[in-house]
Amino acid sequence: MRILVTGATGFIGRRLIPALLDAGHRVRVLLRPDVRNPCLPPGQPVEVALSRLDDRSGLQAALAHVDAVVHLATGEHRGPRGRALYPVDVAGTRHLAAAAHRGVRVVVYLSHLGASPTAAYPVLRAKGLAEQALRQAATHFPTTIVRVGPVVGPGDHFVRPLARWVRTWPAGWPLPLPGGGSTLVHPLWLEDLVAALLVLLEEPAFWGRVYELGGPEHLTLHEVVQALQAHLRRPHPLVAMPPLLARWATFWLHNLWPGFPFHPYWLDYLATHRTADPDTLPREFGILPERLTALLPLILPREAPA
């Protein structure tokens, strides 16, 4: 199967590409024309298609002879103040859906738990609108939507920023958590997600459905930070910060402090409880997911920076 991967240079894409190649698939990656070198895994025999997501003819060329698409591209972490969110996640997905031809057998889209076109939070609303665009194009190809919570692994966008926050906060000072850290999250190990995506691509019985995936445990942010503090040996008393104040502080610190660990939309992940059925991975995919506490030594070796 020839598979086009968007967002191939991101945190998930860089791990998914070798797994697809090891499984015997041919991989084509969609790269934006850019003067910088792409962060593709070295030595991987992939095809490269250069196109922006708003280039209809470029997308059509990238999709030629493609059997499946894994759509990972997102603007959540790109550009000042997250300005790429709607151009990439919403408009870009609409362009991709319009360019996909009848020869595409399936599109797998990575979304978020809590995604909805009417969500109050920009990230969740953008993902919901992208899902909607793909559903409207489902007469041409089946769309499989995979909704996840925080995906964790080396270099992730959830544990790593929290670890930097814990490590850089002055020793003994109370560490503020939005809403006291009461929001429930559902972390998912990167390797478990990649294994599930491989199953989805190779089993047509899974196509055209929505899956909500997470690890074996629901955790509050407070519990996650406590586990990080224990692993990093950086204890702090934890105190509640009003969510509105946390959002305001994140916005300004992101613009004033180049090394600030949280991007402008990071708090969207914690705006509401976002959990799935912990039994979905073992029941549907035969995958026994890993617990976050067991993964911390792999994600954050104590001797390495966050």
Image (tube, rainbow, N blue to C red):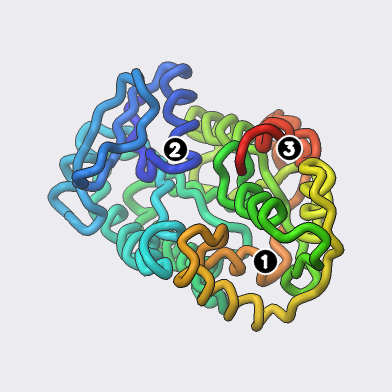
Q: Look at label 3 and name its amino acid.
A: Leu
Residue 216 is at least partly visible in this image: no
Q: Is residue 4 above or below residue 120?
A: above
Image quadrant containing the N terminus = top left
Q: Is residue 301 above or below residue 168?
A: above
- Element at badge 3? helix
Q: Look at label 1 and name its amino acid.
A: Leu
Q: Which residue is mark 3?
A: 296
Report the mark closest to the observer, 3 or 1: 3
Q: Look at label 2 and name its amino acid.
A: Gly
Whole-number angstrom distance, CA of label 3 to CA of label 2: 21 Å
Relative to 113, 35 lies left or right: left
Residue at the extreme front: 171
Q: Are marks 2 and 1 in contact (CB under 8 Å)?
A: no
Whole-number angstrom distance, CA of label 3 to CA of label 1: 20 Å
Identity of the residue drawn at 55% across and 74% down: 121
Residue 270 badge: 1
Q: Callout 2 environment at 10 Å: few (<14), some (14 to 19), or many (20+)?
A: many
| Image location of residue 275, percent across then percent down | 72, 57
Q: Which residue is mark 2?
A: 13
| Image location of residue 262, percent across then percent down | 56, 61
Image quadrant containing the C terminus = top right
| Image location of residue 18, percent across then percent down | 45, 24
Identity of the residue drawn at 24% across and 47% down: 32
Residue 298 is at least partly visible in this image: yes
| Image location of residue 176, percent across then percent down | 75, 69
Q: Earlier in the sequence, mark 2 or mark 1?
A: 2
